Image: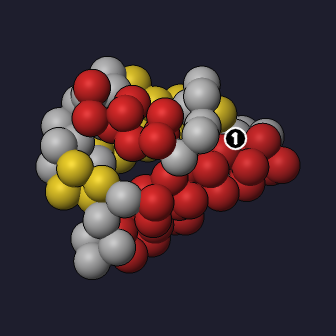
Amino acid sequence: MSARITIAEIATLKHCPALASEIREALVPGGDVEIIAEGVATGDLTTVQILLSARKTAASIGCGLRVVHPSVNFLALFRRAGVEGI
């Protein structure tokens, strides 16, 4: 199964429960999940935590997970959190 998930323009604590749920449902053994981050204008550590957790879960079940077209703001959010190479 392949899934494409688009992160909203505002990716903060208030907006992330839906993102977490969508990613959780998409992560299946042998699947492939593409996270589209080109429209992210602002976010917080909640977004970082969700994606780091998703990456760990995906690796443990043999599911592909990649972020495509990350916006400058998305990349800056991860740099501020001390995370490189999402």
Image quarter hosting the N terminus = top right
Instruction: Note whether 59 is above or below 11 in the view shown.
Output: above
> Quick check: 65 left or right of 48?
right
Q: Which residue is mark 1?
A: 63
> What colouring method underlies this structural image?
secondary structure
Under tag 1, what secondary structure? loop
* Residue toward you, 49 or 67: 49
Image quadrant assignment for residue 70: top left
For the question of whether residue 27 can be seen, the reply is: no
For the question of whether residue 39 can be seen, the reply is: yes
> Quick check: 64 left or right of 46?
right
Percent of width and height locating residue 85: 60, 25
> Residue at horizontal 22%, vertical 42%?
40
> Residue at horizontal 45%, vertical 65%?
46
Q: Residue furthest right?
A: 60
* Residue toward you, 4 or 70: 70
Instruction: Note whether 59 is above or below 20 in the view shown.
Output: above
Instruction: Note whether 53 is above or below 20 in the view shown.
Output: above
* Residue toward you, 33 or 80: 80
> Residue at horizontal 29%, vertical 48%?
7
> Residue at horizontal 16%, vertical 49%?
9
Percent of width and height locating residue 50: 53, 60
* Amino acid on which the number 1 mark rests in the picture: Cys
Crowding at label 1, few (<14), some or many (≥20) Cα neighbours within 10 Å? many
Image quarter hosting the C terminus = top right
